[in-house]
Image (cartoon, helix red, strand yellow):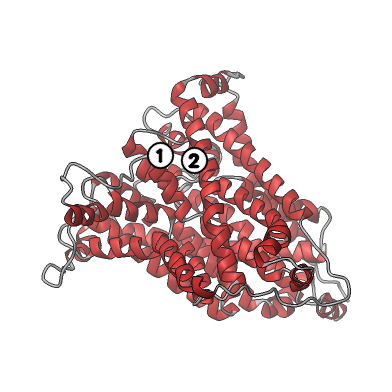
Amino acid sequence: MTARFDLSRPLMMAVAALLAVMIVLPMGWLVVYAFADKAGNPTLANFVTLFTDPDFLDPLITTLIIAFSTSAVCCVIAAPLGWLVARTDMPLGRTFRVLVMASLVTPPFVGAIAWEMLAAPNSGLLNQVWRMLTGMPSDEALFDIYTLPGLIFVIACYTFPYVFILVANALDRMPGELEDASSMLGAGTWATARRITIPLALPTLAAGALIAFLQALNIFGSPAILAIPAGFNTLTTKIWSLFAFPPKPELAAASALPLLVLTVALLRTQSLVLGRRGYAVLGGKYGAPRVVRLGGLRLPAAALAIFVLSLPLFLPYAALLNTAFSPVSSQFVTPETFTLRNVIFTFRELSSTLPAMQNTFILATLSATVGAALSLLIAYVVARQAIKGWRFLDFLATAPLAIPGIVLGVGLFLAYTRPPLTLYGTLWILLIAFVTIELPAAYQQIRSAFHAVHPELEEAGRMLGATRMRTLWDITGPLLRASAIATWCFVFVGVIRELSAAVILFTSETKVVAVLIFDLKESGDVGAIAVLSLTIVVITTVVIALANRLRGGRASLRAAA
């Protein structure tokens, strides 16, 4: 009997090679261009310019100020709110937790646009209300979103949920016996919090601060919406501007490398912080954490939580809805002025809407399918140690976490605008970018699901003559179906939200909805912007709701976050 040729090993090796090319090739060209002049000769002149020319040095300093400030603001907001939700009897605590996680559905650049509608100095709705209430002159404003503090505020609105989730989850898992012992020794509630609760939660809060710093460091959409009109740049917007005619790819590459190095260093620091965190209770299971009774502070605490949630959720969505259905974006909509004109204009008269929607759905579907399949294969190889070098494959699958979207966009632009593989101007280059960006989250979800599938099931199939790929298809795959579908949904959502890489790689024929919204911002079509922004949010919400049904409620929201 002739043995069948097993394609499993060659296929897995091909996946490893593909993953290496996806990540190493663009990063390699990034380094080559960063250390070369226009003629291709080796030089350090690009970095001299970066760290001495005010046109580059000022955005770098501004970016660091924003990152540090955002991190501090997020900790100040998220730590008390996480404690109120996780450890007190504040009313509607579970609802607040879900709403904070739901705020992550809003793409940050959409949030920036909404806050522009709310707090622009002249036309902002909040400023108009303030003028009506106080009689303030029309040339004065209470809020001005086109400032550095305004930008920090908006970025913090859509970054603090990451810190909140970490802190709340850490407080949920904290052993109640430690606090009980403190109380038995005579310590009051606040003394126990100061001596027990806060020290145990502090490493997690530090990790959350690093995540907030990282998010603010690499964000592109919000600074592009608010900083450029205010007359200043961040490092990401400066990198984007270097692709205007005449393009300066060598300076863009040199500007991108500090972001990449700093991101890697921060992720390594976060790993060390979380790796050292821990506590153990001797004697078996530990009890639930103590619930702190707020007494007369219950309602003020709930009011504080509602106010915090109004900043990323209630007020921005009210502004988007008002603008979408108002004939004049700077006026409040009434039953008499309610109109569908903006909706009709966006989907019938705006010629770029349908092609952008089509490109977005094609890319989201393909990216989700390729990303989920790649994640499944890589997770299988790593979980079952199916080939030599599986640790390196695990590293490659998580490495894109350390590559900011705009940095990856620059690397892909440099790699695929030349023979033999000229992909710039096609959807393929965007597909590579989106799969690479979303791969780490997809891989982490699938890999965690593999822990629930015992390898004995696959070994039984192998003993009966099945190949590794056949056992993965017939045995492991069906058992992981819910996780795989949920992963598909989350990659789909991530692609719809992605702007930073797309804004570097798109052309007029490959524009996606996020880039279309960004372009409409420059042309001033505010009604169409509101309609498209709400469309993105609705699609994202529906897909996440579907994933929640497949995986079961709150766990999926945490995975999406």
Q: Residues within 10 Å of mark 1 (few under 14, many from 20)?
A: some
Expressed as whole percent of the image width and height from the top left, the position of residue 31 reads: 62, 32
Q: Are marks 2 and 1 in contact (CB under 8 Å)?
A: yes
Is the N terminus in the top left, top right, bottom left or bottom right quadrant?
bottom right
Q: Residues within 10 Å of mark 2 (few under 14, many from 20)?
A: many
Residue denoted by label 1:
148
Q: Quadrant of the C terminus?
A: bottom right
Up the image or down, 55 lies above or below 364; here it is above
What is the three-letter code of the residue carrying label 2?
Ile
In the displayed structure, would residue 378 be above or below residue 545? above
Type of residue at label 1? Leu
Distance of label 2 from label 1 (alpha carbons): 8 Å
Task: Find the residue positioned furthest to the front.
Answer: 186
Q: Residue at x 31, y 44 (%)?
A: 144
Residue 448 on image: x %, y %: 71, 68
Q: Which mark is residue 66?
A: 2
Say if 189 sits above or below 202 in the image. Answer: below
Dot 1 lies on which element? helix
Identify the secondary structure beneath mark 2: helix
Please state the horizontal and vertical placement of residue 315, each as a whole percent of the image: 34, 62
Residue 182 visible, this orientation: yes
The reply, left or right, for residue 59 in relation to residue 315 is right
Observer-nearest of 428 and 146: 146
Whether residue 374 appears in this view of the structure is: no
